[in-house]
Amino acid sequence: MTLRSDVLAYIPSPPQGVWQLGPIPLRAYALCIILGIVVAIWWGERRWQERGGQQGTVLDVAMFAVPFGLVGGRLYHVATDWQKYFGAGGNPIEALYIWQGGLGIWGAVFLGGVGAWIGCRVYRIPLPAFGDAIAPPILLAQAIGRLGNWFNQELYGRETTVPWGLEIYPRFDANGDPDPMNGVSNDVVEKIVHPTFLYELLWNVLVVVLLVQIDKRWRIGHGRLFALYVAGYSFGRFFVELMRDDEATMIAGIRVNSFTSALVFLAAIAYFVFATKGRETAEQLQPGAMNRPWPWQIGALRAAGATAATAGGGVALTKESAKDDAGESDSESGRLDDPGEATSENSDSGESATMSAEKSTEATAASSAKSPHGGEKSTAAEKSAAVAETGASPDADESIEDAKSAAGVGEKSTADKGE
């Protein structure tokens, strides 16, 4: 260990990451995570509404996604660094101490995505469009969360002499015993390392800017912007992992996080290439149920879902669903027994006109049979009868006039026979 000779030569680590407010520990790591979540929800709400979505949707879905993400992040960390908790000298109960750091981003994204999928299913909004709206905010939240690693003096790289190297201090508790997480440093430099947390933070911010610009210029949709976020983050994380030399699980001689980054990168690129192009319309972002209870109101959620189903699903999400709703309404009202018998509005009008003409013909024939003397007066009467029968003006449709002419010929023939 050496004393700091030049405070401006390297980046100092915070002397501590925890402050006691009476019996309550105030942890910088937790504050950074919370701040990142708040920023992601706030910005995600704005982006969702700019796309045409309903206000409050991101917060509602976050009530599912955030808890799932935290659990997934912790599970991934424990699974990939299980020796710290279940190996020799480990304390298994510390696997639950999430406030001491240790959230694997891949587990957070995976289970967070599962939670978001559940939320989107509950509120009946498209998950891919939701992912596109929150992709930049999520990555910005990750950048803010990396500041928590700085306070915890974790996720740093190999020792270095670069001018931007990070100073690592040993920390001690009030009794002078080593306590890296909760203790306070004595301003003695233990080593100078690569600030890989800072490299990842800066890379995340750069990708956020790129995502926003790509979204504005090409109007990315159907989950493809989210895929670019995953690919961009994975690409940077792969190289950051190569700079670390702390203990980690290996797969075929490769750090597990580097291995995961490469696989996730390839999967994200494949989705971006093969996913549907274009962007969802504002109508497609509307929820199926307009009354959206809180996620923990299970009974209210079920009631809202039943009400939406009874009402035909509320706002139509797509043209196909709108057609389905229309078909259901016709079937319920008894207008259509078989969807295959449905015809266009124009053909219905044509059939009505034909039926009206037939009715007028029948009325004319009946009138001629009753009036053997025929003549102009009989024709006028026939026109009046046709108007009364069809509800149209005498010159409203040529088909009616043609029918009347035909009826007149028949009348004359009948009259001749009578004479």
Image (cartoon, helix red, strand yellow):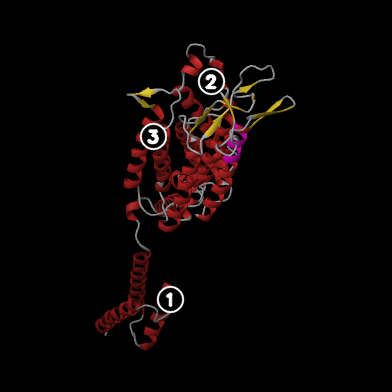
Of pointers 1 and 3, the one earlier in the residue sequence:
3
The residue under label 3 is 261
* Mark number displayed over residue 392: 1
Q: Are marks 1 and 3 in contact (CB under 8 Å)?
A: no
Count neighbours of disc 3 (C-alpha within 10 A) and say few if under 14, some if 14 to 19, many if 20 or more. many
In depth, the one of 268 and 157 nearer the eye is 157
Residue drawn at the location 50% of the way across and 39% of the way down: 163
Of pointers 2 and 3, the one earlier in the residue sequence:
2
Residue 265 placed where, x, y %? 36, 39
Question: In this rendering, which labeled residue sits more in front, label 1 or label 2?
Answer: 2
Disc 1 and disc 2: Cα gap in Å?
83 Å
In depth, the one of 102 and 137 nearer the eye is 102
* Mark number displayed over residue 116: none
Q: Is residue 218 above or below residue 411?
A: above
- Mark 3 lies on a secondary structure that is helix
**The magenta stretch spans which residues?**
29-37
Q: Is residue 409 magenta?
A: no
- Mark 2 lies on a secondary structure that is helix
Residue 108 placed where, x, y %? 49, 33
Q: Is residue 170 visible?
A: yes
The residue under label 2 is 95
